Amino acid sequence: MFGGGYALSTLQPLRWLTEQLIYWGDIDTHGFAILSRLRQLFPATRSMLMDRATLLAHQTQWVREPAPASAHLPALDDPEADLYRELVEDVLGPSIRLEQERIRFSTVRAAMNNGLPPAAGTPTG
């Protein structure tokens, strides 16, 4: 969707997306809000590079989120919900945002080469 994250309604007619839908957005409150809304339409949606490890590995690339959200996001998994809470509560700093284009390309390539992230609720170890 490239920049149209809140335009999720355009995806609703595309029911075939339910099988392999991966969302990669900014690590900020709005990125998680979009992910939660997307999962309400497509519950099997997986996130990619929207985790605490990615955020912390790119600390020099953080910028400020201009207008953070603070809504209840029911469709996040536990690690996503924990990171969202930390962003809302400014645990790591005020209005932290890591825009996806600031993530090192080598990190993106490694994530793609390692295959899809595990589905929500799938044991990883």
Image: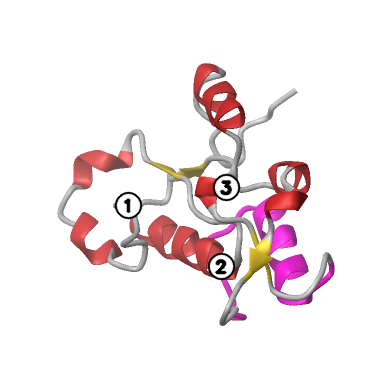
Q: Please provide the residue range marked out in magenta.
A: 69-91
Q: Amino acid at mark 3?
A: Arg
Residue at the disc numbered 2: 74
Residue at the disc numbered 3: 102
Q: Position of residue 65 (x, y in %)?
A: 60, 72
Q: What secondary structure is found at the residue carrying circle 1?
A: loop
User: Which is more N-terminal, label 1 or label 3?
Assistant: 1
Q: What's the residue at 77%, 67% (across, down)?
A: 86
Residue at the disc numbered 1: 2
User: Which one is in front in this view, the residue at disc 3 or the one at disc 2?
Assistant: 3
- Find residue 44 and report its image quarter: top left
Foreground pick, 104 / 53: 104
Looking at the picture, does residue 55 appear above or below residue 17? below
Q: CA distance from mark 1 to mark 2?
A: 24 Å
Q: What's the residue at 72%, 45% (across, down)?
A: 58
Q: Position of residue 84 (x, y in %)?
A: 67, 65
Q: CA distance from mark 3 to mark 1?
A: 15 Å
Q: Amino acid at mark 1?
A: Phe
Looking at the picture, does residue 37 appear above or below residue 118? below
- Mark 2: few/some/many CA within 10 Å (<14, 14-19, 20+): few
Q: Position of residue 97 (x, y in %)?
A: 64, 63
- Find residue 66 and report its image quarter: bottom right
User: Which one is in front in this view, the residue at disc 1 or the one at disc 2?
Assistant: 1
Foreground pick, 43 / 37: 37
Q: Position of residue 49 (x, y in %)?
A: 59, 41
- Mark 1: few/some/many CA within 10 Å (<14, 14-19, 20+): few
Q: What's the residue at 15%, 55% (across, down)?
A: 13
Q: What's the residue at 68%, 52% (across, down)?
A: 61
User: Which is more N-terminal, label 2 or label 3?
Assistant: 2
Looking at the picture, does residue 62 appear above or below residue 121? below
